[in-house]
Amino acid sequence: MNPAFQRIKTCLLLFFALFFSNLLSGQTLNPYYQEIVSKVSYDTILSNLQKLSNLGIKEPGTAALNNTADWLVEKYQSYGYTNISRDNFVYNGNQLSNIVVTKTGTIFPPKYLVIDGHYDTYQGPGINDNGSGVVSILEIARLLSHLPCSLSIRFINFSAEEEGLIGSQHYVDQIVVPTNMNIMLVFNIDEVGGVNGMINNTITCERDEDTPTSNNAASYSFTDTLVNLTQLYSNLLTKIYYAYGSDYVPFQDAGEVITGFYESNESPYPHSPNDVLENMSPAYVTQVAKAATGAALYFAGSQAVNTSYPLQPQEPACIFPNPASNELQWKIQTISGSYLVKIIGANGQCIAEKSYTSNSECSMDISRINAGLYSVLFYFDNGNSMSVRFVKGLNP
Ligand SMILES: [Zn+2]
């Protein structure tokens, strides 16, 4: 093909991809999720932030850090969790603990959604960094405690993040890598408190743009999904930025797929005695917690037990890359058995189909399909189906 024409065609396809980005993203408002998200409580968030204020400066070796760990364990217990453990490690002669809470999935328990945020602080009480993330995670844990979810969820509050990601690096080195932990996605929440006196209406959604690059396309796709879910379940605007300097880094370095939330008005107060409740916005944290709860429900594949809601299909969380050229890949939340994948063209004709018997193979060769807009349909053996649109780009 003439190179100039090829460029024009590529531009048209990219335009198509952007124009149809809402359709491509695939999620629509789920009334069942909406009802749960509506229970995210400003009062609960405020009282948990006040408790974290009273606990003081949470640096390694302080009673405040140990007391905060104890308080977190009590909180998770009060929400009904029984699988709570401490991942202990020694740093600078101090015995420290990551708090690890597991909620077992109902359909695909070996696969995990990790939701994490650190609870240690530096040179201040850290009510924004990262009290805001901790109370957001507590809200998700409180509201999802008794809801069946297809995937297992692991809530982790890391310690010694401020000392150089020590707790999360320890967890990845000692648990994730040696046990070959099956993680669908790591969702990190760090510093989402906003700045008192400013208009706090935007959340930064973070994605992996770093090496290794093998896990970046999936991170981009999940982050696009997070953007869409944020718009569905909160009143926040979104922007996308690269992930850096928080507990997702050891995970992404080990090849795991990550996404994250970070405040858009970057507060000047973290790592100082002024990182206090009065300098941030609990109302903003409440919106962040709503977005995060909607995202957690979707990513973990929560299904309504109340029959007044339609049973949700087992949705693939994402397909990637999008546009795709040679190979289309997907991450599926739940597979109870075999499934069939069909590629459907604009006229409704079936272009390709393939049966899958295991969840380990999640890709299809699309190199011989013409460039254009397609739907990929997943038919699960329990009768559910799911359709996601994608753009087939030009072969490189
Ligand atoms: Zn932080």
Image: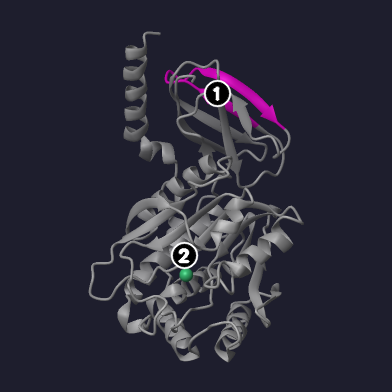
Task: Name the main secondary structure of what is drawn in magenta.
Answer: strand
Q: What is the three-letter code of the residue carrying label 2?
A: Ile
Based on the picture, tell me whether residue 198 belongs to the magenta stretch: no
Alpha-carbon span between mark 1 and mark 2: 40 Å
Decide if residue 10 is on the left or right side of residue 156.
Answer: left
Foreground pick, 154 / 169: 169
Helix, strand or loop at mark 1: loop
* Colouring convention used in this rendered image of the protein: one colour
Neighbour tally class for label 1: few under 14, some 14-19, many 20 plus, Cα within 10 Å: some
Residue 361: give x, y in percent of width and height: 69, 34
The label shown at residue 326 is 1
Residue 346 sits above or below residue 3 on the image:
below
Residue 232: quadrant of the picture: bottom left
Which quarter of the rendering shows the N terminus?
top left
Q: Is residue 347 visible?
A: yes
Measured from the top left, where is residue 85 in percent x and y? 70, 74
Mark 2 highlights which residue?
Answer: 36
Q: Which mark is residue 43?
A: none
Highlighted magenta segment, given as a residue range:
340-356
Residue 304 in view of the camera:
no
**What's the amino acid at mark 1?**
Asn
Total numbered labels placed on residues in the image: 2
Within the image, what quadrant is residue 273 found in?
A: bottom left
